[in-house]
Amino acid sequence: MTGRNEPILRDVAQMASVSIKTASRVLNDAPGVAPLTRAKVLAAMSALDYRPDPAARTLRAGRDRSVGVVVENIGDVFVAALVASIESRLSDAGYQVLITSSHRDVDRERVIVQDFQQRRCAGVIVMPTTEDSLVGLRLGNLPVVFVDRVGQHAGSQSVVSDDFELTRLATQHLISHGHRRIGILSDSQNVPTTRDRHAGFRRGMADAGLAMDSDLVRDDCPDERFVRDALTDLFALDSPPTALIATNTRLSLGVVPALHMAGRTDTAFLSFGDFPMAESLTPAVTVIDHSPRRLGEITADTMLARLQPGDAEVSTDPIVVPAGLIVRGSGELPPYTAAPQFTAAVASDTD
């Protein structure tokens, strides 16, 4: 290594008494290398503190050891947990993860994915803004896995929850405990998951022979900051809701303190998605166990399967991650007999 600061693969091969080709096969974890030979090469790499050049490896392999991840908003509590799970799984497999937010902008989403492809990422994982966000985008043979929402792209696969059925189940659960006036809080129904959850809510009501009251539907809550005003309006109705469903975790984090501040914990409440301390509240919050950790693990494993060398066929059928109801108390409260006005404390910003 005279005149050089860093060892190269030739130095590793010489120390291990193997050819450069064999040392390269060990470096790239290729099959067909005898265990003893592999051990000698790895020992030489360790002894020399050999660090492969990522750029050179990318040029040789055609792809980098990185995976691009595009989500709606990394600041969302559910998304943050999802990304952490994906990153942990891929990191354990030797991949770097590049994460960015689309902010529900289809054009931005397409540009980001195209950029990941030009950077020679090994694959991309996308939480699509719409089902057809990437339709028509030329990505060559870049593996694409959609997460949390069904997406469309040639050869891609989606890892999702059954949003429709799970919300139908939540609605039926509240109805089985005597509720007929059920309010639903969500963000815009332009979001595919939200749209499916509203459809499940409507089906649950229809299956029970209950008419839908549009006054009980609030789909104008992007985040928890809008929850207080929505609840103030709902509880000011002549016939207010006796039960509530929040269609995502960030809204649940607004509903809980609002109900407690107003002394209205007699309102049955069911959250789509669990959150920290939900089981410790009084009453503890009944949730649809829409686990971001489990969703992230399965998404990462799906991507890793597509990154394996070989020509084996991969499925394009959506993977539906199992989820169910966790009964804790808030979703099992009976309808309250009186419906007092929602107190002004809920609408106050002085706290």
Image: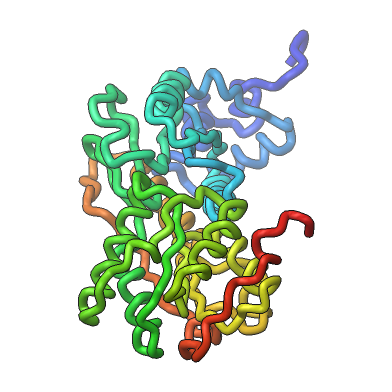
Is residue 302 shown left or right of residue 97?
left
Is 36 rendered above or below residue 61? below
Q: How many marks?
A: 0
Residue situated furthest front in the rendering: 238
Q: Residue 218 falls in which quadrant of the image?
A: bottom left
Is 335 rendered above or below residue 257? below
Q: Nearer the viewer, residue 163 or 322?
A: 163
Is residue 158 shown left or right of residue 218?
left
Which image quadrant: the N terminus?
top right
Q: Nearer the viewer, residue 178 or 200?
A: 178
**Residue 255 drawn at (x, y percent):** 58, 66
Q: Nearer the viewer, residue 90 or 44?
A: 90
Residue 67 appears in the figure: no
Residue 3 appears in the figure: yes
Q: Residue 111 falls in which quadrant of the image?
A: top left
**Residue 263 drawn at (x, y percent):** 67, 78
Q: Which of 54 and 33 is in front in this view?
A: 54
Looking at the image, which residue is at 73% across and 32% down?
A: 49
